[in-house]
Image (cartoon, grey):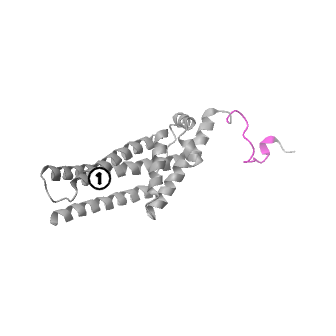
Amino acid sequence: MPPESQMPINPYAPMVGDSLNDPIHHAVDIRKKFLNHEASVKSIGLLYLLGAIFLVPIGFCTMGISAYALASNSNDIDSPWVVFIVGVFEFALGILQGITGLALKKLKKWARIVGIVFSSIGLIGFPLGTLISAYFLYLLASAKGNYVFSEEYQQVIASTPEIRYKTSMVVWILLGLLLGLIGLAVIAAVVGSIVN
């Protein structure tokens, strides 16, 4: 039998020593296992924040336009009270989305429930809204999603602050293009309303 130093190393053999019983080592393993899911859940929060950035001003403007129509007895709007109520709804929904988005980025338990409700409602938006909302529901309602929002996982995050998800450059470029397209659409709508 060859001496121990010359024996081939079995990569599948269990580790010897205390490293498996080390809580930090265990936390690192758990964090690495759930890091992609954690990042995906936090990206839902980012999308909700983007939605809030658009909904809050739209709701505010809708309320302002209808309030002006009511105050001046203008006939420019057919049902100013209905438009005002729609504006209040948009504004409130935007605020709720913004708060939920921030809470999802911090993995707050209550935000998971609100996100599941939003995603369930989003299933109505066939076909694209249905696909996106179904994916969001998977992220939030799956066993992994449940664990990412747990107290235990919060402790894992606290004990592994050095582990961070690195977003690829492709994702940043696609996000920049998406925001650019949204910005161009808003500018085109504003210019179109001024010209007409």
Q: Which residue matches tag 1?
A: 86
> Furthest residue to the right?
1
Task: Say which residue appears at 44% left-offset and 58% top-offset.
Answer: 170
> Left of 80 or right of it: where is 102?
right
Task: Say which residue appears at 63% left-offset and 37% top-offset.
Answer: 26
| Residue 108 appears in view | no
**Helix, strand or loop at mark 1:** helix
Numbered-mark total = 1
Task: Say which residue appears at 58% left-offset and 47% top-offset.
Answer: 144
Asked whether 101 or 115 is in front, the reply is 115
Residue 30 image point, x, y percent: 60, 41
Q: Main secondary structure of the magenta part?
A: loop
Residue 11 inside the magenta-drawn segment? yes
Residue 115 image point, x, y percent: 46, 47
Task: Say which residue appears at 24% left-offset and 62% top-offset.
Answer: 189
> Which range of residues does the magenta coloring cover?
4-19
> Left of 3 or right of it: where is 93?
left
